[in-house]
Amino acid sequence: MRAGTDHIPETERVTIDEIAEAYEEQCAFVENHGGRVILMASRALARTAKSPDEYADVYSRILRQLNQPAILHWLGDMFDPKAHRLLG
């Protein structure tokens, strides 16, 4: 089941910790209902992260908490051109 940060409004300014917490909320829901996490790319993270290290920090924080391996989902600008533009 998909877990992401799409519930964060695009107009809302958030911190890296708030983005990680949004992922944690959805990942916990998926795992608590017996699903396997498919970790979706985050527009909020693309808007907020200032360096590759911040991406690594968020994803490693999330992946360490999961009960089983996750699938990382990123199909690029073909499926989400808006996120691609945010990444520059």
Image (cartoon, rainbow, N blue to C red):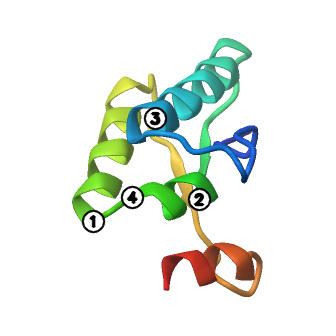
Q: Secondary structure at mark 1?
A: loop
Name the residue tied to disc 2.
41
Q: CA distance from mark 1 to mark 2?
A: 16 Å
Residue shown at the point (27%, 66%) measured from the top left:
52
Identify which amino acid the numbered label 2 is placed on: Ala
In terms of sequence position, does the residue under pointer 4 or pointer 2 come before the other? 2
Q: Which mark is residue 51?
A: 1
Residue shown at the point (61%, 83%) measured from the top left:
85
In terms of sequence position, does the residue under pointer 4 or pointer 3 come before the other? 3
Residue extending furthest toward the top: 32
Tag nearer the camera, 1 or 3: 1
Q: Secondary structure at mark 2?
A: loop
Name the residue tied to disc 4.
49
Residue shown at the point (54%, 51%) measured from the top left:
71
In terms of sequence position, does the residue under pointer 1 or pointer 3 come before the other? 3
In terms of sequence position, does the residue under pointer 1 or pointer 2 come before the other? 2
Name the residue tied to disc 3.
20
Which quadrant of the structure image shows residue 57?
top left
Query: Is the residue under label 1 in contact with that under label 4 (CB below 8 Å)?
Result: yes
